[in-house]
Image (cartoon, rainbow, N blue to C red):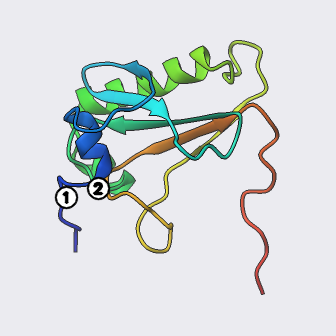
Amino acid sequence: MALAYDDTNIFARILRGEIPCDKVAENDHALAFRDIRPQAPVHVLVIPKGAYVSFDDFAANASNAEILGFTRLCAQVCMSEGVDLAGGNQGFRAVANTGHHGVQEVPHYHLHIMGGRVMGPMLSRQG
């Protein structure tokens, strides 16, 4: 069962201009801005402008133009933030938390791009 999109979520409000953000980049299909609680020296969120709840919702339902625009903006952010491998940099982590088990805090698809330091293991071992 798909979760209905809630247009009162904070990212929808940012997209409508109701809440400011520290914008990094934007195109017709996506917006990138700095996380307000950064977990790394580089911590940028990339969100589609369409009403998608999660990665799987976006991947299944977004148009080809939306997917391409989102993906290209992610690449642009990596380059401008100096974490892209093509630029000779050291890399980054891209994370999309999804649903309750993924600890998704905002019900609007968003990709965290984090870098500027070694990120450590992705998961800790739990018995």
Other-residue count near label 1 (Cα within 10 Å), few / some / many at <14 / 14–19 / ≥20: some
Vertical arrangement, residue 126 with respect to residue 105, above or below: below
- Residue at the (29%, 56%) spot, across then down: 53
Hey, which quadrant is residue 67 in on the image? Answer: top left
Find residue 39 and report its horizontal and vertical position in percent. Answer: 66, 46
- Residue at the (50%, 18%) spot, across then down: 76
Other-residue count near label 2 (Cα within 10 Å), few / some / many at <14 / 14–19 / ≥20: many
Judging by the rendered image, the residue that carries numbered circle 1 is 5
Marks 1 & 2, CB-CB < 8 Å contact? yes
Instruction: Return the residue found at the far bottom.
Output: 127
Whichever of callouts 1 and 2 sits on the residue coming sooner in the sequence is 1
Q: Secondary structure at mark 2?
A: loop
Instruction: Return the residue found at the far front.
Output: 19
Q: CA distance from mark 1 to mark 2?
A: 6 Å
Q: Is residue 34 left or right of residue 106?
A: right
Amino acid type at circle 2 is Val
| Residue 53 numbered tag | 2
Find residue 69 and report its horizontal and vertical position in percent. Answer: 33, 24
